[in-house]
């Protein structure tokens, strides 16, 4: 077969893949029995990345996050957040181990990179009113990893490149993957997903919350809070949420799933005293960070602007304009 015939076939495949929904086997994950979570083919589909390559890629990206962020080292906070995350992962369709870190970042967000490298912002913990609300955002991000949205996004992008650059066939998929991955920075490619993928992550995240014992309505409450904050204080809403916000139609679809798909339960986990204690501890730690930055600096130069008529401390140089400069 000639190369242009191959190119036409791959081009058609790329178009079909780009148009296809993000759900495994073309159907919503919530149509499968909840008892089959972990064994129902979530994340199946064309993907150039094996699980091993996905983990290696995620590790590389996570190192970039750690190198450019302030990672909270408090053992109490880390143990608690890790335990909540791992409990959700155990009740998910993910097939990779999760490594969880807490970042000192005021924006309300959690970020799950391919391969299970999971970052929870301090702003999410402080912005949530309950453990279930925090778990809702975490479950949504875990669902992106379980459905392999990041590597499937990369696969789609590479197929589109194949369609527009037929000479890439000379190097083959492996060579192209090496060149693409080697040039990555910490990317929106792995954080910005299609509407179908976001909808799937909503459905899956709700199921993971439900199976873990949380009230899935808390995810909707948190997303509504994010929408409200985006209007009032946009700086507190992370970029990932601003590019694909939890829209009213997504919230309505999630409410429908909770009402029609999930069997009702008499009790749900809403909040815990441990969450309140960790939240208070984190607030104190954040205050210490801010105080330390004010006292010792944060690596950036700062300027002090004295108020008018403010007395100058002794020993500090002052500037005084000469009388002949007053009119210049």
Image: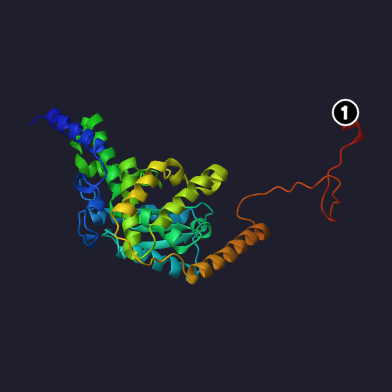
Query: x and y percent of residue 215 in the render?
Result: 39, 61
* Residue 119, quarter of picture: bottom left
* Residue 219, quarter of picture: bottom left
Q: Secondary structure at mark 1?
A: loop
Question: Residue sitting at 31 percent across and 45 percent down?
Answer: 197
Question: Residue sitting at 26 percent across and 42 percent down?
Answer: 155
Query: x and y percent of residue 283 in the render?
Result: 57, 63
Can residue 63 be spotted in the picture?
A: no
* Residue 7, quarter of picture: top left
Outermost left residue = 1
| Front position in the image: 60 or 13 | 13
Q: Quadrant of the C terminus?
A: top right
| Front position in the image: 132 or 283 | 132
Colouring used for the render = rainbow
Question: Residue sitting at 32 percent across and 59 percent down?
Answer: 208
In the figure, 233 relative to 290: above or below? above
The residue identified by callout 1 is 327
């Amino acid at each position: 077969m000639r190369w242009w015939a191959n190119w036409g076939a791959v081009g058609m495949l790329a178009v079909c893949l780009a148009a296809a929904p993000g759900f495994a086997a073309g159907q919503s994950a919530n149509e499968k029995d909840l008892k089959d979570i972990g064994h129902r083919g979530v994340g199946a589909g064309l993907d150039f990345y094996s699980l091993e390559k996905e983990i290696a890629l995620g590790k590389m990206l996570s190192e970039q996050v750690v190198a450019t962020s302030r990672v909270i080292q408090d053992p109490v906070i880390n143990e608690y957040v890790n335990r909540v995350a791992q409990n959700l992962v155990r009740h998910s369709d993910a097939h990779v181990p999760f490594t969880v870190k807490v970042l000192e970042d005021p924006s309300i967000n959690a970020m799950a990179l391919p391969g299970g490298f999971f970052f929870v912002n301090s702003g999410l913990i402080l912005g949530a009113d309950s453990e279930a609300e925090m778990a809702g955002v975490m479950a949504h991000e875990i669902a992106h990893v379980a459905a392999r949205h990041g590597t499937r996004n990369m696969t789609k992008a590479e197929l589109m490149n194949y369609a527009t650059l037929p000479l890439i066939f000379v190097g083959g998929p492996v060579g192209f993957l090496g060149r693409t991955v080697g040039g990555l920075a910490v990317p929106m490619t792995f954080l910005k997903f299609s509407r179908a993928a976001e909808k799937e992550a909503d459905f899956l995240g709700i199921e993971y919350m439900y199976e873990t014992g949380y009230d899935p309505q808390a995810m909707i409450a948190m997303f509504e809070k994010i929408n409200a904050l985006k209007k009032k204080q946009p700086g507190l809403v992370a970029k990932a949420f601003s590019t694909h916000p939890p829209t009213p139609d997504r919230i309505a679809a999630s409410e429908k799933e909770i009402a029609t798909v999930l069997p009702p339960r008499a009790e749900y986990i809403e909040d815990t005293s441990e969450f309140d204690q960790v939240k208070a501890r984190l607030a104190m730690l954040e205050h210490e960070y801010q105080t330390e930055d004010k006292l010792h600096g944060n690596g950036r130069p700062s300027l002090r602007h004295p108020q008018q008529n403010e007395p100058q401390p002794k020993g500090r140089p002052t500037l005084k304009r000469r009388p002949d400069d007053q009119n210049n």
